[in-house]
Image (cartoon, grey):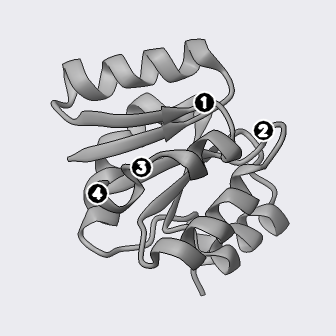
């Protein structure tokens, strides 16, 4: 699977990239530290899934996702965050995210989430999937 990582924490991004490539045998084809850098990537159309931090300076992950979906719909974008408030999760669904991974649980839930989103499923907490 080809992935793009968007997160302002370079250490987290590097750890996630290593895990994806070394442990899960996926390929990271692009990286960005904020929404603006992400939108400037020339590989957006060729990725299978984008892992997007939602809280970043400059252009947030939510705004970057809105813009990317306007330009390249459809895209499989999964939110990466520690912000698990129901109102925030509802906003992610409305914007067009296909899934959600809590950063504290990323290494435990990442592969299953990638497989489900790749298969066309939505991956959000059950209480939001009405």
Q: Earlier in the sequence, mark 3 or mark 2?
A: 3
Where residue 115 sits in the image (x, y, percent)?
A: 25, 56
Q: Give the class, few, some or many, for how many residues have Cα within 10 Å of label 4's Cα (few <14, many ≥20).
A: few
Where residue 119 sits in the image (x, y, percent)?
A: 24, 70
Residue that badge 4 annotates: 46
Q: Residue furthest top?
A: 11
Of badges 1 and 3, nearer the viewer stands 3
Of badges 3 and 2, nearer the viewer stands 3
Where residue 89 sits in the image (x, y, percent)?
A: 72, 64
Q: Give the class, few, some or many, for how many residues have Cα within 10 Å of label 1's Cα (few <14, many ≥20).
A: few
Name the element at disc 4.
helix
In this view, the residue in front, 99 or 27, is 27
Q: How far separated are the C-alphas under marks 1 and 2?
A: 17 Å
14 vs 48: above or below? above
Q: Residue furthest left?
A: 25
Of badges 4 and 1, nearer the viewer stands 4
Q: How far separated are the C-alphas under marks 4 and 3?
A: 9 Å
Q: Earlier in the sequence, mark 2 or mark 4?
A: 4
Residue that badge 2 annotates: 56
Q: Earlier in the sequence, mark 4 or mark 1?
A: 4
Label total for image:
4
6 vs 101: above or below? above
Asked if the residues shown at circle 1 and circle 3 are in contact, with their CB atoms under 8 angstroms apart, the answer is no
Kindly identify the residue that appears in the image at 20 percent across and 47 percent down.
1
Q: How far separated are the C-alphas under marks 2 and 4?
A: 24 Å
Q: How far separated are the C-alphas under marks 4 and 1?
A: 28 Å
104 vs 74: above or below? above
108 vs 74: above or below? above
Kindly identify the residue that appears in the image at 27 percent across and 63 percent down.
118
Kindly identify the residue that appears in the image at 69 percent across and 51 percent down.
61
Residue that badge 1 annotates: 104
């Amino acid at each position: 699977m080809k992935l793009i990582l968007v997160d302002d924490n370079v250490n987290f991004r590097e750890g996630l990239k290593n895990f994806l490539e070394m442990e899960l045998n996926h390929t990271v084809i692009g990286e960005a530290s904020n929404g603006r850098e992400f939108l400037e990537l020339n590989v957006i159309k060729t990725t299978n899934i984008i892992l997007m931090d939602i809280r970043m300076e400059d252009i947030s992950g939510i705004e970057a996702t809105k813009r990317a979906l306007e330009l390249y719909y459809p895209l499989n974008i999964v939110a990466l965050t520690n912000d698990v408030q129901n109102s925030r999760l509802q906003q992610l669904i409305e914007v067009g995210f296909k899934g959600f991974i809590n950063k504290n649980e990323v290494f435990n839930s990442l592969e299953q989430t990638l497989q489900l989103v790749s298969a066309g499923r939505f991956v959000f907490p059950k209480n939001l999937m009405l």
